[in-house]
Image (tube, rainbow, N blue to C red):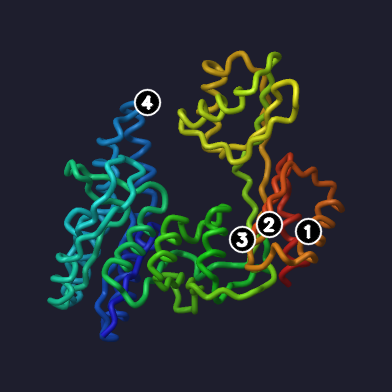
């Protein structure tokens, strides 16, 4: 008898029809003589709606109280799914994060899982129950509810799989695997059968939305076999494991949610760049790339996430009011595949295509499994299609 973890995202649970599809998928695994743990997200856009409602009450809601509020979304999902499975004749029990023994750091909104006491989970499994756990949440040493931030349910699923020493962790969503690029942008995109943890982590860090980077890090640390797949079909998904093979490009990601910032200041001293970085970090803005373009004046260029632009504009009115500034929406194109660093042809072909399209490059970063290029303006999906055709097809 194997122990498996199944994780279902919000789009898979959006209404009662989809809940029934999920229940039947769980039952199929259970009937194959598996011990089954299920981790779920909040239904549909529940979390986004709760955030919106909170901000209608307060411009800056208290983080502790936000965690109390946001954790309710997953609790609705676990109770509904448990009610449905029990009606269908299968013993199921819902557990909140704290009931499942998920203990986290003290931070609200962005807590990290520190350890999992698996006694309750093991007890319910030994009674042949399907254990349904609320993802995205835990409890800290102060006995306060915490949430894990973006992608938290993925992180919960892999962390539970590691703690319980599960044989397999399935991550189900509305897509049936990891693709060679975004199929919504490039029609020729193909599904990838297998990726190493390192390759998947690079894809996640570059903006691919199949798995969150924190869950991949945990999977690699504890050697948890992950398979991504679709809730709505039985197609073979993508396996993520520790298998590493020298390869060509496996996948391409284009991230348009970035802004290139330029700051100038008349006077200059050696610690200005350090002070700028500290100012950004103190306001929860992490610059992705930062360069001083001059040796005798302050002329800094750096990139930030589009989601941080509002906070940065506030800084321009306060701490950075004496700087002249400009900002432009840009793209980052990333090629992922083990061994890219040593493949001269891949780098040459990429640069040739960018040159043919007169793409102005801001930065180029080469690593073992990744080539990332930031442009000085937002580029069209046509570039992604050309790169995909030359490097993958």
Question: In whole angstroms, how far apart are the C-alphas of marks 2 and 4?
Answer: 40 Å
Measuring 38% from the left and 46% from the top, which residue is drawn there? 149
The residue singled out by tag 1 in the image is 350
Please say if the residues under marks 4 and 1 sit with CB atoms less than 8 Å apart.
no
The residue singled out by tag 2 in the image is 371
The residue singled out by tag 3 in the image is 182
Which residue occupies the extreme right position in the image?
Answer: 356
Question: In whole angstroms, how far apart are the C-alphas of marks 2 and 3?
Answer: 17 Å
At which x and y percent is residue 320? 57, 18
**Looking at the image, is mark 2 or mark 1 earlier in the sequence?**
1
Question: In whole angstroms, how far apart are the C-alphas of marks 2 and 1?
Answer: 9 Å
Of tags 2 and 4, the one toward the viewer is 2
Name the image quarter holding the N terminus. bottom left
**Looking at the image, is mark 2 or mark 3 earlier in the sequence?**
3
Along the line of sight, the residue nearer the viewer: 21 or 107:
107
Is residue 58 positioned above or below 384 on the image? above
Please say if the residues under marks 3 and 4 sit with CB atoms less than 8 Å apart.
no
**Looking at the image, is mark 4 or mark 1 earlier in the sequence?**
4
Measuring 29% from the left and 53% from the top, which residue is drawn there? 114
> Element under label 2?
strand
Please say if the residues under marks 2 and 1 sit with CB atoms less than 8 Å apart.
yes
> Element under label 4?
loop
Of tags 2 and 3, the one toward the viewer is 2
Of tags 2 and 1, the one toward the viewer is 2
Left/right of residue 368 with respect to residue 151 in the rendered view: right
At which x and y percent is residue 230? 45, 70
| Circle number at residue 59 | 4
Please rate how many residues cluster around mark 4, counting C-alpha atoms within 10 Å: few if below 14, some from 14 to 19, many from 20: few
> Element under label 3?
loop
Left/right of residue 279 with respect to residue 107 in the rendered view: right
């Amino acid at each position: 008898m194997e122990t498996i973890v199944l994780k279902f995202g919000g789009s898979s649970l959006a209404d009662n029809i989809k809940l029934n599809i999920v229940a039947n998928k769980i039952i199929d695994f259970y009937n194959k003589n598996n011990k089954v743990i299920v981790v779920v997200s909040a239904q549909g856009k529940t979390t986004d709606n709760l955030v919106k409602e909170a901000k209608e009450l307060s411009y800056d809601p208290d983080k502790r109280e936000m965690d109390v509020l946001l954790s309710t979304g997953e609790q609705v999902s676990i109770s509904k799914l448990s009610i449905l499975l029990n009606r269908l004749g299968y013993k199921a029990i819902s557990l909140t994060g704290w009931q499942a023994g998920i203990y986290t750091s003290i931070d609200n909104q962005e807590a990290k899982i520190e350890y999992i006491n698996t006694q309750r989970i093991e007890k319910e499994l030994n009674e042949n129950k399907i254990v349904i756990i609320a993802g995205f949440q835990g409890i800290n040493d102060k006995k306060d509810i915490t949430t894990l931030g973006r992608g938290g349910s993925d992180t919960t699923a892999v962390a539970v799989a590691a703690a319980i020493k599960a044989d397999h962790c399935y991550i189900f969503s509305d897509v049936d695997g990891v693709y060679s690029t975004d199929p919504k942008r490039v029609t020729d995109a193909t599904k990838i059968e297998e990726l190493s943890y390192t390759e998947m982590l690079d894809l996640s860090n570059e903006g691919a939305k199949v798995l969150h980077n924190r869950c991949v890090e945990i999977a690699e640390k504890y050697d948890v076999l992950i398979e991504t797949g679709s809730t709505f079909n039985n197609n073979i998904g993508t396996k993520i494991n520790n298998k590493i093979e020298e390869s060509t490009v496996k996948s391409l990601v284009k991230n348009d949610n970035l802004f290139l910032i330029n700051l100038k200041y008349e006077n200059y001293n050696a610690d200005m760049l350090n002070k700028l970085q500290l100012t950004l970090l103190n306001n929860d803005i992490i610059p992705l790339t930062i360069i001083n373009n001059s040796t005798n004046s302050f002329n800094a260029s750096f990139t930030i996430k589009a989601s941080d632009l509002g906070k940065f504009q506030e800084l321009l009115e306060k701490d950075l009011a004496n700087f002249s500034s400009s900002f432009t929406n840009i793209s980052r194109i990333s090629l992922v595949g083990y061994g890219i660093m040593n493949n001269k042809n891949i780098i040459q072909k990429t640069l040739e295509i960018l040159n043919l399209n007169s793409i102005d490059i801001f930065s180029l970063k080469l690593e073992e499994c990744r080539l990332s290029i930031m442009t000085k303006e937002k580029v069209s999906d046509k570039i992604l299609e050309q790169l995909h055709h030359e490097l993958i097809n």
